Amino acid sequence: MDKERITSEKVKDIAPSYFSNAIRFGGLVFTTAKSGINADGKLARGIKGQTRQSLENIKALLEAAGTNMEHVLKTTVYLTSTKNFEKMNEVYSSYFKIPPARAIVITRGWGVRSRLVEIEAIAGIP
């Protein structure tokens, strides 16, 4: 089985030489943790906007790999504050009919204080 790098013009490829935005391996797709940065490099405003953009980035990568949000099996959500959980969860929940398994990690940030959330996903390919 070969692994394949997945890209999408809808997703900013910040550091293509250091990591892949997504990898397809067998019947699975693994995304890197995506923040709320759009394809033009602009960070969405607020926790709801960043959560939505992060999930749209994941959605675009999954579609490029031949799957979709319906087939997400597991996510990890990285939040910089527990205060943002409810607003993040409101947006997050709207993306899934059957919620995937999920882990929440509270972090100290990524060196850029305005980044409030990053989300990574593992999805099956039907």
Image: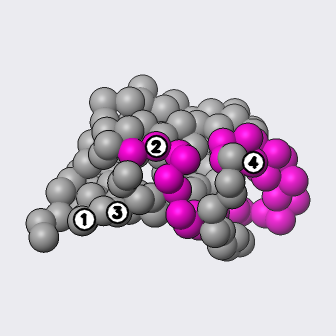
Q: Measure how far apart labels 1 and 2 are at the Cα level.
A: 16 Å
Q: Please tell me which residue is depicted at 42% across the width and 26% down the height of the picture.
A: 40
Q: Which residues are magenta?
A: 67-96
Q: Amino acid at mark 3?
A: Leu
In the displayed structure, does residue 122 sit left or right of residue 79? left
In the displayed structure, does residue 96 sit left or right of residue 85? left
Q: Amino acid at mark 1?
A: Phe
Q: Measure how far apart labels 4 and 3 are at the Cα level.
A: 22 Å
Check residue 106 for magenta coloring: no
Q: Measure how far apart labels 4 and 1 are at the Cα level.
A: 27 Å
- Which residue is label 4 attached to? 93
Task: Please report whichever mark, 4 or 1, sits nearer to the chain's N-terminal start.
Answer: 1
Q: Amino acid at mark 2?
A: Asn
- Which residue is label 3 attached to? 28
Question: Mark 2: few, some, or many residues within 10 Å (few <14, many ≥20)?
Answer: some
Q: Amino acid at mark 4?
A: Ser
Between 126 and 76, the one nearer to me in the picture: 126
The location of residue 7, given as percent across then percent down, is 27, 42
The location of residue 114, given as percent across then percent down, is 66, 47
Question: Mark 4: few, some, or many residues within 10 Å (few <14, many ≥20)?
Answer: few
- Which residue is label 2 attached to? 68
- Which residue is label 1 attached to? 25
In the displayed structure, does residue 91 sit left or right of residue 70? right
